[in-house]
Amino acid sequence: MKVVIIGYGKMGREIERLLTTRGHEIVLVIDEDNRGELNEGRLRECGAEVAVEFTTPETAYGNITTCLEAGVGVVSGTTGWLDMLPEVERLCREKGGAFFYASNYSVGVNIFFRVNEALARMMEPFGAYDVTVEEVHHTQKKDAPSGTAITVAEGILAALTRKDRWVGRTTTEPDELEVLAVRRSVVPGTHTVTYESPDDSITITHTAKGRTGFATGAVLAAEFICGRTGIYTMEDMLGF
């Protein structure tokens, strides 16, 4: 598999290591200092099959559409740009391309999403329990709350009729779901959902121990879409 890495920070380097270990060829690495090389001509010239894109909310849309226009499948893990997701999906279908998006590529986190949804359905009849979401990340993370926390919140809102919307602040409004973002120096990522009643608390937590789990999922996603067309998520890859 011939792969382009777009975004060469800590995640990009870990993805590079895993791709190399698994015998794939990295044909192009794009970072801030050579952003101009990300164009249709260069992508076709290097024979790229799949691009793995972990960049910034400001650059993600342009990166993804450039790849799709060049006939290169895209795995994107950038969050904070999803207002443009329908346009990317439209372009992908129009070009007969492949696009894979997840707010979090960790297999464990995606299991956590399912547990969260199941717990929310179970808690629907029990109005004495209020629910909050908290996420803790390293200080370099650019979006807050994280895309993972938003996915968790959306899973809760789909099941709990007493919550109408999530808010990124402390709230006492009964129809608002509190989603708090905390930033600390070297935390890979922790997400916690707490149901609190006057009598007890129920808590579920996912704690990342490093970037390898996220990078592994992204590499598996690249392998999954290579040679395919369509729009895919972790649920497709994991068979949920």
Image (spheres, rainbow, N blue to C red):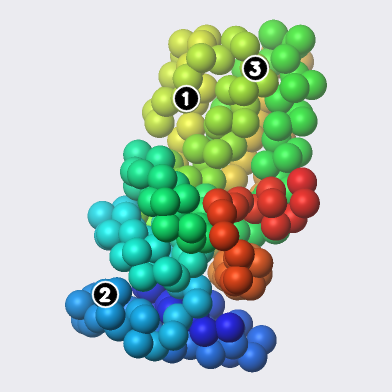
Instruction: Report x, y in % for residue 102.
Output: 54, 52
User: Which residue in the structure is indicated by mark 2?
Assistant: 39
Q: Is residue 197 left or right of residue 141?
A: right
- Whether residue 3 is visible, yes or no, is yes
Q: Is residue 184 above or below residue 23?
A: above
Q: Is 62 or 91 nearer to us in this picture?
A: 91
The residue that label 1 is drawn on is: 166
Cα distance between the residues tagged 2 and 3: 45 Å
Q: Quadrant of the N terminus?
A: bottom right
| Distance CA(mark 1)–CA(mark 3) | 12 Å
Give the vertical position of 240 relative to 179 (above or below).
below
Q: Is residue 68 left or right of residue 49?
A: left
- As measured in the structure, the alpha-carbon distance from the residue carrying label 1 to the one carrying label 2 is 38 Å
Tell me the element at label 1.
strand
Circle 3 residue: 160
Q: Earlier in the sequence, mark 1 or mark 2?
A: 2
The amino acid sitting under disc 2 is Asn
As helix, strand or loop, the secondary structure at mark 3 comes to loop
Classed neighbour count for the residue bearing mark 3: other residues with Cα under 10 Å, few (<14), some (14–19), many (≥20):
many
Disc 1 crowd rating (10 Å Cα; few below 14, some 14-19, many 20+) is some
The answer to whether the residues at label 2 and label 3 have Cβ atoms under 8 Å apart is no
Camera-nearest label, 2 or 3:
2
Counting from the top left corner in percent of width and height, residue 232 is at: 59, 52
Instruction: Out of 127 and 216, give the one closest to the viewer.
Output: 216
Name the foreground residue: 219 vs 215.
219
| Front position in the image: 80 or 86 | 86
The answer to whether any part of residue 31 appears in the image is: no
Q: Position of residue 4 (x, y in %)?
A: 43, 79
Front tag of 1 and 2: 2
Residue type of the residue flagged with mark 1 = Trp
